[in-house]
Structure formats: structure tokens, C-alpha cells
Image (cartoon, helix red, strand yellow):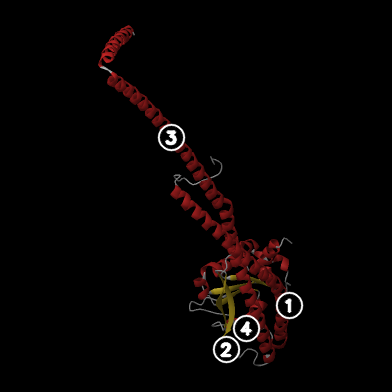
Amino acid sequence: MSGKGQREAIFPTRMALGNTKTRLKGAQTGHSLLKRKADALTKRFRIITAKIDEAKRKMGRIMQLASFSLAEVQYATGDISYIVQESVKSATFRVRAKQENVSGVFLPAFEPVVTEKGGSAEFSLTGLSRGGQQVAKARETYTKALQTLVELASLQTAFVILDEVIRMTNRRVNAIEHVIIPRLENTIAYIISELDEMDREEFFRLKKVQAKKKAKSEAADLERKAKQEEEDRKAQGGDSEATALQGGEGKSGDILSGGKDEDVIF
Amino acid sequence: MSQQAADRSLVALIADEDSTTGLLLAGIGNVDEKGEKNFKIVDNKTPVSEIEETFNHFTNERKDIAILLINQHIAEKIRPIVDRYTQAFPALLEIPSKDHPYDPAKDSVLKRVQKLFGE
């Protein structure tokens, strides 16, 4: 019997066997599906990681450029940081989250949304006296840099989510492969062995019954034969019958008495 | 997760004065009705506890921030927290500052990327 390994606690019947077989089939299908999903996600993951690596390096260059343009502003206008900080009211550069579906996983992608209504008006007075051109240029550079940053951020978010989902999927794949499927297989083996055992018992029982029946019918046959012979003799003649009867009585009387004696002794 | 992403639209910032000025010029700055800003200027005198507090505030309490930008040299100050941060929203992005060039080796995400590729 398959005592080794885990199996489910069920009664070994044919129905349970059928059910377990269906479940094993389901588990195998699920396993192959999940495996494929994990593969698809991993493929996507590798693309994204490569992109992140590249974008991060690109970001360094772009931010350097932006800082340089800001330095130009400071050279032309003087320190504008205070004015800029204080005139902040409402964000004109916002992001919107879009969603992309990669085999059942929603990956958010940020999209920059620039509302122009206050965008240029907000800092319109900055650098009015001098350096207005530099300020405009700096703003443009920074907006461009921000767009790169937003792109990078969405890549990174996708990276984080994918990482988690891949881990979860792999965990499921492994659980099915190493726990659920062996357990179902063990259960099936157990049920089959139990059923076989029951079959053998049944066979043995039938054999026994048959033997008993045979013995009985043989005994009945013998009795019938004896009766037949007796009847034959009866038919042959009355004289001989009488003597035979007497002899028979005497004998049976002897046996009876002998039997009684023995019983009393014991 | 999708619900989370839908109402997040702002870009928050923890940075030094120069980076802040530049990015505010691009228009990410936002002050809400309560007078709460979505940017934090950090200089050499800012205590680490204050940075941590702002970081936690931006990442956990505010629900309208989609991306959090942080200067790498500031992230370096609160590195344990940054490394432990694994949420998808808001997305955390380390950016270089004027005085501190960008070092990919320090970035928490790039570190994970490199770990995955076994480099």
C-alpha cells in the first residue's frame, strides 16, 4: 500500500477514484497554464529590466543638462528659488495612470498630463526684469526631464508589480508541482491498491462459498443415492426387506447405546 | 491595485533647493486647501528624522501622489527605509542632484535589478 507520502483522507471507493483522477487532471492543466503565465511574465520582466537599466543611465545625463540650464538662470536672474517656491499653487504637471494587461496582470503606466492653463502664467513674472529667456528654457528642459522621469517611474512600478506577481506565480507553480500533484497521485495509488485488495477478498470469499456449495451438493447426492438404493431394494422383495430392516434396527440400537455411554463418561 | 492608481496624479518631491526650483518650474508643485505642499526642500541642516517623517507622509498618508522623486544623496541618508520600501504606489524614483552625480550602484531598484541578473 502507498503509505509513503501524503494522501488525502478519503474513503477508497470507485467514485472517489474518479473524482481524484479528475482533480489530478485539473491540477496538471492548471500547472501547465501557470507555468506558461510565469514564462510570459518573465519575458516581459526581462524587457522591462533592460529598459530600466538604460533609462536610469539616461536620466543621469538629462538631469545634468537640466541642472546646467538652471545654473544659467541663476547666473542671469539671480536666485529665483524663493519666488518659485512661493508662487506654487496648483500642479500643472500631473500624471495619469493607464493600464496595460500582461497575461492577467495589470501594469500601470504613467502618462504625463500638462495642463497649460496656468502653466506659463504661473511663473510668468519670474525673471521679468532679466533672464526671462533662460527661465523659459530651464522650464522646458525640466519638463522634458520630468517626462523621462515619469516614463522611468512607470517602468519601475511595472517592475515592482511584475516582480511580486512572478514570485507569486512561481510559488503556485511549485506548490502544484511538488505538493498537490504528488498528493493526488498518492491518493489514486492508495485507492487503487485498496480496491484491488477488496477484489481479492471478494474473489476468495466467492471461492469459499463455491467450495461449500460443492460439498453440500455432494453430500446431498450421496444421500439421494443411498435412498435410491434403498427404494430399489424395497421394490425387489418383501422378505429380504424384512430381514434387512431387523438387522438395521439391531445395529442402530447398538450404536445409540454405545454413544450414550460415552457421553455419560465425559 | 487599479483603484489605487486611478486617483493618484501628483508628483511629489524630496530634494535640495536647486532640484526643487527646477522641477517646480516644470510645474509639479501643488499646494492643497490645507496648505500642504507636495515638495520638501532638504538642505544640510535638515535632520534625518524630518526627512523620514516626510518620506513616510508622502508614501503612506497621502493618497494623491503617483510618483515620489527623491534626490539620491537624500535617499542615502534614509537608505534603510528606502531599501525597505517595496510598494508599487507611489513609485519611488531616485534622481541625481546638481552637486551629487548619479551613481547607479546605490539605487535601490537597480540593486534589485542587478541582483536578479546575478551580476
Residue type at tag 2 = Glu
Q: Secondary structure at mark 1?
A: helix
Q: Report the disc number at residue A205.
A: 3
Callout in the foreground (3, 4): 3
- The answer to whether A6 is drawn above or below residue B56 in the figure is above
> For mark 2, does the 10 Å Cα neighbourhood hold few (<14), some (14 to 19), or many (20 or more) residues?
few
Residue, disc 1: A61
Circles 2 and 4: CB atoms closer than 8 Å: no
Residue A160 drawn above or below residue A147:
above
Q: CA distance from mark 3 to mark 4?
A: 92 Å
Chain letter of disc 4 in the image = B
Of residue B95 and residue A216, the one placed in the foreground of this image is: A216
Q: Badge 1, how many Cα within 10 Å: few under 14, some, many 20+?
A: some
Residue of label 4: B26
Q: Is residue B113 left or right of residue A91?
A: right
Say yes or no: labels 1 and 4 on the same chain: no
Q: Taking A8 as reference, is A55 above or below it?
A: below
Quote the CA–CA distance across marks 3 and 2: 93 Å
Task: Label 4: state its secondary structure.
Answer: helix
- The amino acid sitting under disc 4 is Ala
